[in-house]
Image (spheres, helix red, strand yellow):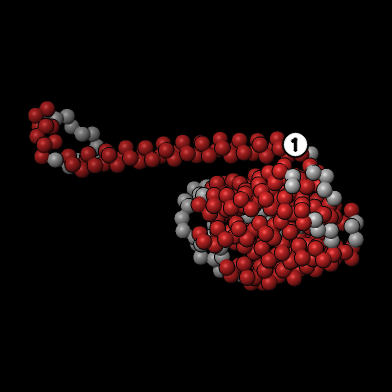
Amino acid sequence: MDLTLALAGLGVGIVVGLTGMGGGALMTPILVLVFGIPPVAAVSSDLAASAVMKPFGGWVHARRGTVNWRLVGWLCAGSVPSAFCGVLLLRLLGDDETVQHTIKISLGVALLLAAGGMLLKAWVSRRQPEGPAAPITVRPVPTLLVGVGGGLIVGLTSVGSGSLIIVALLALYPKLRANDLVGTDLVQAIPLVLSAALGHAFFGDLKLDLAAAVLLGSIPGVLIGARISSRAPGGIVRTALVVVLLASSLKLLDVPTATVGIVTGLAVVAAVVLAGIQRARRSAATTASATTAGETDVAERLRVPAGAAIPPQPVGVAREHDAAG
């Protein structure tokens, strides 16, 4: 068994557990470009590994209460049958490179726009504090259609069980917390990828040894990522989502791997710098607030208006006042 492949699975598993996405968009290109696996075998093996890997991350989120089960039900009602139909459609269309390339480019553009949309949303709502989850009113028909579209794309390309559906959920339910978004997407992806994997196993070229090597690293990886995601502040999860969206979109647009690494690395550095600036501003605001509160407390003790100049007192009077306090 290839330990390098297991290490790749570990890295992808952490990304999937942390963000709920990136499995097909990252693992399939790695299998094809880095390890030289034939595309059909890479797609089917990646789906089989995801069908086993995602329940571990979903279980962690379910225990933490970061899963919207009504959304999961409506998504699965559309995605499970359409994923199997996507595999059948792929067999009818054949392995036509033009069709596959068009689907891949379209998805890459959608993910790139989604990354920009998440950045814009974070910029607009940057002053809103993290709080309890806002009540979400489930919209059955649009959610069902999201499941149908996402399942079809997954059946055709193995990409989209996390990336495409998580973007659609973000658009439909902007009040859904980042942690709940990741947990809901992870759980709904379990029956989706299982359906697509069964279809590929029945019609395609599934390599069990390849799937087992990926699972060796991806299972502990997704557990680590899910534990971080379920406990982490929403800002950290949103940052990870944007980075993974950016990397996935660039890879789907056939950007060279080195360029993808440089761009995503710069994005991570920018996120760290911005987080440091924001933390410094919060610290300064907290210090200023504490100083103001202290001045108000002193003014109340001396019974003078807050902000007014405190008259100087003789040393003896000040000592008597302190002793009385």
- Please give the count of numbered marks on the rendered protein: 1
Q: Please name the residue shown 77% across and 65% down the image.
A: 198
Query: Residue 18 appears at what percent x and percent y?
Result: 60, 50
Where residue 181 sits, quadrant-wise, is bottom right
Image quadrant for the C terminus? top left
Residue 73: give x, y in percent of width and height.
Answer: 63, 70
Residue that sits furthest to the front in the current view: 1
Residue 43 appears in view: no
Q: On the rendered structure, is 8 left or right of 277?
A: right
Decide which of 280, 148 is in the foreground and name it.
148
The amino acid type, in three-letter code, at marker 1 is Thr
- Identity of the residue drawn at 46% across and 36% down: 280
Whether residue 240 is situated above or below residue 49 in the rendered picture: above
Check the image and report above or below for 287 versus 188.
Answer: above
Residue 56 left/right relative to 147 = left
x and y, in percent, of residue 258 in the image: 75, 36
Secondary structure beneath disc 1? helix
Give x and y (percent) for residue 169: 64, 60
Instruction: Provide the residue designation for mark 1.
Output: 259
Q: Tell me where residue 90 sits by quadrant.
A: bottom right
Instruction: Say above or below: 120 vs 259.
Output: below
Q: Is residue 299 visible?
A: yes
How packed is label 1: few (under 14 Cα within 10 Å), some, or many (20 or more)? few
Instruction: Tell me the residue at 71%/64% (across/down).
Output: 194
Residue in the picture at 66% in, 56% down = 53
136 displayed left or right of 146: left
Q: Residue farthest to the top?
A: 315
